Image (tube, rainbow, N blue to C red):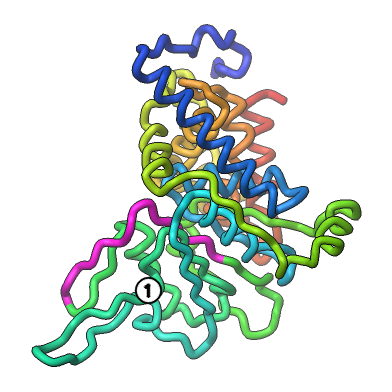
Amino acid sequence: MSTPSTAPVARIKPTPDAEDSAAIRAAAADFQRAAAAVRETVRGKDAAVELALIAVVAGGHVLLEDVPGVGKTTLASALAAALGGVLRRIQFTSDLLPGDITGVPVLEAGGFRFRPGPIFGNIVLADEINRATPKTQSALLEAMTERQVTVDGERHPLPSPFAVLATQNPTDHHSTFALPDSQLDRFFVRLSMGYPDREHEREILRSGGLRAARFPAALSLAETAALCAAVDRVAVHPDVEDLLLELVSRTRSDARLLRGVSTRGAEALLRACRARALGQARAFVIPDDLLGLAQAVLGHRVLPRVEGERGGGERAVRAILAEVFGG
């Protein structure tokens, strides 16, 4: 297969009209303002900040997997503030019920009225999601896919924009439940914060720790909505589409994997690439976008042949990338 990775950028570069060019420049400026605001709080984790912002702007959800106390909750709070959104937090525990998330009908004078649950926010922090039972975790499926919840046969639309940022403790921790595959596939990206380096950790300690973090605003909710809408203006050349489809196809036949990437996963990668291009003020996607995002977007959507192998999905995707790109 002839890959676009070796083709001149001019070959895949469209000529956007004046309206698209202006919209993309404005959106890129807003993207960078929001990223800078989050980085003021989440220090030394620029790659994680950019990836989380790409996911939210693209209309996706984020799974943060790491040990407690490294800034996962801080990232969610900083994102909500930077984007002008309402933050809601749900602490997942083994006795949490689906109605505690979606809301329930309550009896008042004149009949029943729906009382919205904490899922009704712009950024919803699902903290320690894998401490709840699979039944309770499944209460998020409709919300994450359709941006609505159905209670007693009545549909209730969620705010826009809407994104779930779920934190997950390592599965070898006490009292955790593995996320079902259907749940994993609805997360746009999976990322790990990791421990800060020495100097950034020193800065955090000197400034009062994570509890003393400030959450500066950058955009209004209307500006965030316009930023999300601008993703659709980014063009994708057929050569880049072919490269993405080749990558996805190889995950479905690779001997290292029992299951490859779903069509939802392919859609997520394409949209993530568009959001990354937008953040860099480009009107078109390039192969480097695929290289930069494929592991985070696809790694949790594949099933390694070696059961329980931590990081096996990301390693397999990384190996397939090297094969497809010839590097």
Residue 248: percent from left, percent from top: 50, 38
Quadrant where the N terminus is found in the figure = top right
Query: As shown in the figure, which amino acid type bears the numbered disc 1?
Result: Ala
Residue 52: horizontal and vertical position, in percent? 57, 49
In the image, 3 versus 183, the foreground residue is: 183
In the displayed structure, 153 sits above or below 270; it is: below
Residue bearing the label numbered 1: 139
Instruction: Please identify the quadrant where the C terminus is shown.
Output: top right
Q: Residue at x 48, y 55 (%)?
A: 61
Q: Residues within 10 Å of mark 1 (few under 14, many from 20)?
A: some
Asked if the magenta segment contains residue 16, the reply would be: no
Question: Can you tell which quarter of the image residue 5 is in?
Answer: top right
Question: In this orientation, which residue lies closer to the viewer: 10 or 239?
Answer: 10
Total residue callouts: 1
Nearer-the-camera pick, 253 or 21: 21
Residue 132: x and y, percent?
A: 51, 81
- Give, as a single range, the part of the protein colored magenta: 153-166
